[in-house]
Image (cartoon, helix red, strand yellow):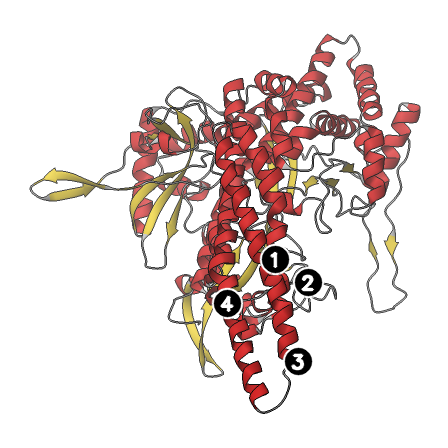
């Protein structure tokens, strides 16, 4: 294994053998490892009294109230189970408006007198905790002096025991976070409300198809992209440590232009990291299934199997934490920032979303004959209408300071929201619009290679489109805009809410209709006709599409700062109020937090850029100039004119003067931003329009100098060092 650290694999291994003189740890069967650190259904069934288990399942599946006696029984069993796994503490894990998880650890010990303690964990401890709410962003909901806040157990997301390298373990309980005044201060609470809203309204519509499922659940499978770089090189880059991205860096001679990284052979060190990562994730019950090299050098991807949206959200946060923890353990650094390197692929989090009934029916599955599947057509029409009617806030849900670098670049979907359906569904939609009903759809083709030894197989009925922000991929929609650092709670909450609202409007019409069947056909045709402008199957990267989208009246919102105001528009407030997901105060608070967070991140980047320029790049270049001057003088002493040295010194000095002046001007721009801090929208706008858009004036001369200065004289690792030397 690497270094002196024990890898995560060692934790879940039970045997070793010698291969080529090295000790290799053989992993236990994955089925034995998987979920071993999760208080899942099987563990609850084993450890809880039968009556308690039944009552808890009623709460999890049907939302029935949880009484205190059941909570006490669950807490006792959960404590004993966690202690068996080495836990000494417990914590309520929540997702405040920072978008990162938060946790406060409390020990199980309780003094009983005589200098002795007992290990105790009650139903009250399980159900709620009280973190300090004043230290988290609240968007004005709470004053700094008003500190009380509560976390409440989300029993639908299983608890787990998290372990650290030094052997410490803590029981982690997924929770929601609320203010003392009742407003949500987190991303989990609105997400859970949106799931309830989607279930409620989808069940109303399904009743007209003679179906009465107990519940409809939104599901998601988030693909996570990330970069791996050498830890020692990472530690030498102030920009990576402080901001997550490189603020300086000339392109390496080789990038991704040969397309040889994507799905390429995984380097041995990276493969070993992935093995360690999988071992950790599997014991947490995270269904990490797919792993591969992504498009850019040093870029990779991991993808889980679908899960209910709130559980998938909790798992994705744990996945991001584990990625970074295991990377450091393996002498690597994991970069989750959306665009850590200019000029190469950025990282997203492709959000594969659908919703299904408790009877196991995926409502986004068209079946073999979508032209006759009226139920699917109605739900498809509802989703397309929701996306078209609420494109601005769906765009907002994928907005961040980091994702502004990525959206619209050549590896990401554009900032314009459109939906890709593919040839089969587009044909069905066209028929419905023109004739009121669909009569046929293109059949799937057979693959025939012309090689006798290769198999023939039935191909999918439609292609895929990687340039679409919202692409149908067989039985789900892939929302490709979400950034790699973002919590998936917000985009999924948005999707659930806007689709629930559209289904509510449909159900209201059906409730008032004399002929429900005829009304369903009318609604499908009406919605598809009205919202067909959102359907686009072509190249979303092309300039032609930008012009075409403008003709169609589709919004094109280039940056986060311009997207945030839509969160507090009258239309948005009414949709969220009607669905019971967030009130006006909560929406306004989130808008303020998003803008303030954006401004602060840009400020940090700007100050880091100034410091690196003044304290690292400029001194290093001056020192290199001095060495060149000494060399030139020594050469002239032997009677040779040092023309090359003088020319290079002059060239470097000209760019150095430009960098020094640009840095000084940039500092003036950054310093002036303090004038806007009391007005958060104005502050965020200034940070985008003046600071963010001025960063290139400092970066360009610095990157030019990198190409002129000797490698050993440059003050920090280059792109070539970071991307190709893992």
Sequence order check, earlier mark of 4 and 3: 4
Sequence order check, earlier mark of 3 and 2: 2
Vertical side of 638 occupied by 129: above or below? above
Q: Secondary structure at mark 4?
A: helix
Q: Position of residue 596 (x, y in %)?
A: 50, 34
Disc nearest the viewer among 2 and 4 = 4
Circles 4, 3 touching at the beta carbon (< 8 Å):
no
Q: Judge left or right: residue 700 versus residue 114.
A: right
Sequence order check, earlier mark of 2 and 4: 2
Quick one: label 2, few (<14), some, or many (20+) residues within 10 Å? some
Q: Which residue is mark 2?
A: 263
Q: Residue at x 15, y 39 (%)?
A: 111
Residue 620 is tagged as 4
Q: Which residue is mark 1?
A: 658
Distance from disc 1 to disc 4, alpha carbons, whole Å, reads 15 Å
Sequence order check, earlier mark of 1 and 3: 3
Q: Position of residue 388 (x, y in %)?
A: 74, 28
Vertical side of 653 occupied by 503: above or below? above
Distance from disc 2 to disc 4, alpha carbons, whole Å, reads 39 Å
Circles 1, 4 touching at the beta carbon (< 8 Å):
no
Residue 643 is tagged as 3
């Amino acid at each position: 294994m690497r270094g002196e650290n024990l890898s995560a694999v060692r934790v879940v291994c039970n045997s070793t053998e010698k291969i080529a003189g090295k000790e290799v740890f053989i992993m236990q069967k994955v089925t034995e490892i998987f979920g071993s650190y999760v208080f899942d259904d099987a563990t609850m069934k084993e450890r809880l009294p039968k009556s308690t288990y039944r009552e808890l399942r009623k709460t999890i599946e049907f939302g029935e109230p949880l009484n205190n006696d059941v909570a006490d029984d669950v807490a006792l069993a959960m404590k004993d189970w966690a202690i068996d796994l080495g836990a000494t503490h417990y914590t309520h894990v929540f997702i405040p408006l920072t978008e990162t998880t938060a946790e406060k650890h409390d020990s199980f010990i309780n003094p009983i007198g005589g200098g002795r303690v007992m290990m105790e964990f009650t139903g009250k401890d399980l159900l709620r905790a009280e973190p300090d709410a004043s230290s988290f962003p609240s968007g004005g909901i709470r004053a700094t002096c008003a500190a009380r806040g509560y976390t409440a157990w989300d029993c639908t997301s299983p608890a787990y025991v998290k372990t650290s390298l030094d052997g410490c373990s803590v029981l982690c309980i997924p929770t929601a976070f609320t203010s003392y005044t009742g407003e949500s201060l987190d991303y989990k609470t609105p997400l859970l409300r949106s799931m309830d809203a989607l279930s409620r309204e989808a069940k109303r519509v399904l009743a007209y198809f003679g179906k009465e499922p107990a519940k409809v659940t939104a599901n998601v499978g988030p693909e996570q992209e990330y970069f791996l770089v050498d830890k020692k090189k990472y530690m030498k880059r102030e920009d990576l440590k402080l901001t997550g991205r490189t603020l300086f860096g000339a392109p390496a001679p080789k990038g991704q232009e040969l397309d040889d990284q994507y799905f390429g052979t995984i380097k041995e060190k990276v493969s070993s990291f992935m093995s360690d990562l999988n071992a950790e994730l599997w014991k947490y019950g995270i269904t990490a299934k797919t792993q591969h090299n992504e498009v850019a050098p040093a870029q990779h991807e991991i993808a889980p199997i679908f899960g209910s949206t709130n559980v998938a959200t909790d798992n994705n946060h744990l996945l991001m934490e584990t990625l970074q923890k295991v990377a450091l353990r393996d002498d690597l650094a994991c970069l989750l920032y959306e665009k850590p390197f200019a000029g190469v692929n950025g990282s997203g989090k492709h959000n594969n979303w659908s919703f299904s009934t408790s009877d196991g029916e995926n409502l986004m599955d068209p079946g073999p004959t979508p032209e006759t599947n009226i139920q699917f057509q109605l739900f498809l029409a509802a989703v397309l209408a929701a996306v078209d009617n609420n494109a601005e806030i769906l765009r907002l849900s994928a907005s961040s300071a980091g994702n502004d670098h990525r959206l619209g670049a050549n590896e990401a979907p554009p900032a314009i929201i459109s939906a890709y359906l593919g040839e089969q569904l587009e044909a069905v939609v066209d028929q419905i619009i023109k004739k009121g009903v669909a009569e046929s759809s293109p059949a799937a083709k057979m693959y025939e290679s012309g090689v006798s030894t290769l198999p023939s197989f039935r191909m999918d009925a439609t292609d895929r489109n990687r340039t679409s922000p919202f692409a149908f991929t067989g039985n789900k929609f892939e929302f490709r805009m979400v950034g790699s650092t973002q919590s998936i709670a917000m985009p999924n909450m948005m999707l659930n809410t806007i689709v629930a609202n559209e289904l509510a409007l449909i159900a209201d019409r059906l409730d008032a209709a004399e002929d429900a069947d005829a009304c369903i056909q009318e609604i499908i045709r009406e919605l598809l006709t009205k919202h067909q402008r959102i359907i686009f199957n072509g190249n979303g990267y092309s300039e032609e599409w930008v012009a075409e989208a403008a003709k169609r009246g589709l919004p094109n919102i280039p940056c986060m700062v311009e997207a945030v105001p839509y969160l507090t528009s009258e239309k948005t407030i009414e949709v969220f109020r009607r669905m019971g997901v967030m009130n006006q105060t909560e929406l306004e608070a989130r808008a303020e937090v998003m803008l303030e967070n954006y401004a602060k991140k840009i400020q940090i980047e700007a100050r880091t850029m100034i410091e690196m320029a003044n304290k690292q790049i400029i001194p290093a270049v001056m020192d290199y100039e001095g060495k060149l001057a000494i060399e030139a003088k020594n050469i002239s002493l032997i009677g040779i004119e040092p023309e090359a040295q003088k020319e290079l010194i002059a060239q470097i000095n000209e760019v150095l003067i430009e960098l020094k002046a640009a840095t000084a001007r940039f500092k003036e721009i950054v310093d002036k931003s303090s004038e806007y801090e009391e007005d958060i929208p104005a502050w965020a706008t200034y940070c985008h329009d003046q600071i963010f858009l001025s960063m290139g004036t400092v970066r360009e001369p610095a990157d030019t100098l990198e190409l002129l200065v000797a490698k050993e004289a440059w003050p920090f690792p280059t792109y070539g060092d970071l991307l190709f030397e893992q």
